[in-house]
Image: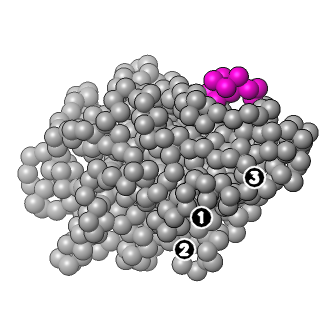
Amino acid sequence: MNGMLCTSCSDGCRRDDKPREECGVFGVYGADGACDVIYRGLFSLQHRGQEGAGLVVSDGVRVRSVKGLGLVGEALAGKPVRDLQGHLGIGHVRYSTTGSTRIHNVQPLVAECVDGLWAVAHNGNLVNADKLRRMYQESGSLFQTSTDSEVLLHLLADPMFRRRPKRVARALGELRGAFAFVLMTKSCLMAARDPHGFRPLAIGTLGEGGHVVASETCAFAQVGARFVRDVEPGELVIFDENGMRSVFFAERADPLAQCVFELVYFARPDSSVFGESVHRIRLEYGRLLARQHPVEADFVASVPDSGNSAALGFAMESGLPLDYGFIRNHYVGRTFIMPGADQRRSGADMKLSVLAETVRDRRVVVVDDSIVRGNTARKRVQALRKAGAREVHVRISCPPVVSPCYYGVDFATREELIAHDKSPQDTCVWLGADSLGYLSIENLLAPLAQPNDYCHACFSGNYAVGIEGAQTKRKWEDHALATPELNLDMG
């Protein structure tokens, strides 16, 4: 879930050069010390959002919630996290574009219905959220956040669904767009994925018979869990005292629309996403990029960290040595996730420094995962020139980004995308590079086991789910009703 657009900043607020991250969700059932398991799982998903974090835990009788702003360690530091007792719970890491972050937008969202408490954490974007929100507001319902996730809580509280069998499945069936949900009551954990499978969600088992669900499998190693399978598109999986069972709330789409950008950029290299090894796919992208856009040069340099695997593949295929061109300051977070304009501008300057002795008087191939607006890429080309690089050749392990995403990735608007009105040749000149090469859509899909099951609308403009009336996450939340902050005391 993203935040609202900062309308008070200059256009520097939109100068970050990467697609803005989605979120990360985590859930556990049947584990002593569930709070600690969630806490560690969220650390492994920190790359998916660093503006806020929260968790909700239940011991079967009492439900307790803590959340805060910043990284997991910052957001939950000083709070009674270690004192939260329970065997089940859910957690969430979040990013936002807002310059004035609101704590009550941080998930999990918690609400009390007539039959008890519900908690929800969401990764994705609901394209019919505005319609559902308006419907409930017109009937007198009050909303406490500006996130689209809250509409699910209203569906769950709606008597039309509350009094019927398969209540959660029926409510999920009303949603359109991209979602990976983890939900809980005081005695039950649930996980659901939209019928197109846009966002990843995996199931694992703990050694003592417990279960975990997470946006990425990298979180399983951190908590000592074993990967079992993915939540299927259109499936609701339920974990309670009777074990694990599932129902399908919607028919699986054919073809699916799994987000290929998870493999290009979002997911951690040590994750398996949509049944694919992220590192292996990125390695192959680098190989294909070297074949598609060969160049005479002295060495290959990655833009760390997301460009590392592709750069290695490029070096292996081209026969060029791989060397350090940039050194990353790991104490500066992902610049595009930072909510404020000044933070993002200064972060972009502090994040990477050029290793001058490596690049001086040499021809450098710079491999990165993507270019969105181009501003940061341009700065890095300039920095290499200033350090004495003789030639700078830019290679990008995905196609040009030409369209915004409506399914949970907060790209820039179409007009802000550098590839919207510039050819690769024009972009190369604007960057100040000696050459520029993008991976083709054909090569993007070539290494995938089921290439037809991936969404590539940001590269092709072909949207898998109707977007009439839909808005990007940033625009939707900018238009959502601003409400006073709600203080939920779950003690």
Contact? badges 1 and 2 (CB < 8 Å): yes
Q: Name the residue under label 3.
A: 381
Q: Which amino acid does label 1 sit on?
A: Pro
User: Spatial distance from mark 1 to mark 2, Cα to Cα?
Assistant: 8 Å
Residue 179 on image: x %, y %: 33, 49
Callout count: 3
Split into 4 quadrants, where in the image is the N terminus?
bottom left
Residue 197 vertical position relative to residue 99 in the rendered view, above or below? above
Residue 75 vertical position relative to residue 249 in the rendered view, above or below? below
Marker disc for residue 192 = none
Q: Name the residue under label 2.
A: 6
Q: Is residue 17 magenta?
A: no
Q: Is mark 2 on a helix, strand or loop?
A: loop
User: Spatial distance from mark 2 to mark 3, Cα to Cα?
Assistant: 29 Å
Q: Determine the residue positioned at 76% across, 34% down.
A: 297
For disc 1, the neighbor class at 10 Å (few under 14, some 14 to 19, many from 20) is many
Q: Mark 1 points at which residue?
A: 339
Residue 79 on image: x %, y %: 58, 53
Residue 223 on image: x %, y %: 52, 29
Q: What residue type is labelled 2?
A: Cys
> Which of 367/333 is in front?
367
Q: Could you tell which of marks 3 and 1 lies nearer the N-terminus?
A: 1
Magenta-tinted stretch: 313-322
